[in-house]
Amino acid sequence: MRNLFILYVLFLILGCGGGNQQSGFENDEPITSAPIAKSKIITSDTLFIDALGANMSEMKFNKKVIRVPANKNITIALTNESSDATMPHNIVIIKKGFANDVGQAGLRHKVNAYVKPNDQNVIANSPLAQIGETVYFSFKTPEIGNYEFICSYPGHWGLMKGEFITK
Ligand SMILES: [Cu+2]
């Protein structure tokens, strides 16, 4: 229900934006790879990330590096491509070097997608995406710098991680 509400709000916000503006992202690879079916709330500032892998040893994000403009409102759409129902994923943008701290702190906060509320080391996080699900979240990117992203689902952050760079 809460996710539906967030989607509705996003739709209201993003639905008003023009579709012709240039993307502010500079990426080594195309940002968008999403099928048309998801286009309802896609804008040029939506970044698509996939969580891949059918088991604990294969799990990973489809990007190792995310580059975005600093101080800019963006939306991340995370799709869980796993076929294993025991593999929910999220994406958490964190201060560099705090993957284990954030993961450990989130262990007791399942209701908050395994992120400790008001964790000082967390910049933004998505809800949990169950298999086949796409979750969306919007936030203002931090000032110019190097950050990290992880999945904070218990046991995942060792493999599911990457660099988050703003410039
Ligand atoms: Cu995960």
Image: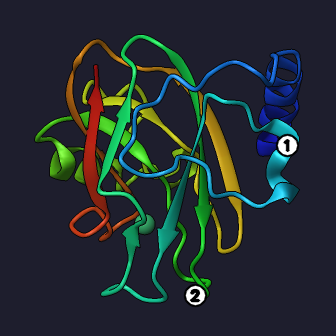
Q: Is residue 142 left or right of residue 32?
A: left
- In front of the other: 3 or 31: 31
For image coordinates 69% across by 18% down, the residue present is 21
For residue 4, the mark is 1
Counting residues from the start of the chain, the first of labels 2 and 1 encountered is: 1
For image coordinates 39% across by 53% down, the residue present is 108
Q: Is residue 5 above or below residue 1?
A: above
Q: Quadrant of residue 11?
A: top right
Secondary structure at badge 2 equals: loop
Q: Is there CB contact under 8 Å for labels 2 and 1?
A: no
Residue 4 appears at what percent x and percent y?
85, 43
Q: CA distance from mark 2 to mark 1?
A: 23 Å
Q: Is residue 31 above or below residue 84?
A: above
Residue 45 appears at what percent x and percent y?
61, 28
Q: Quadrant of residue 88?
A: bottom right
According to the image, label 2 marks what residue?
Answer: 84
Tell which quarter ligand 1 is in.
Answer: bottom left
Residue 25 appears at what percent x and percent y?
47, 30
Q: Is residue 44 above or below residue 107?
A: above
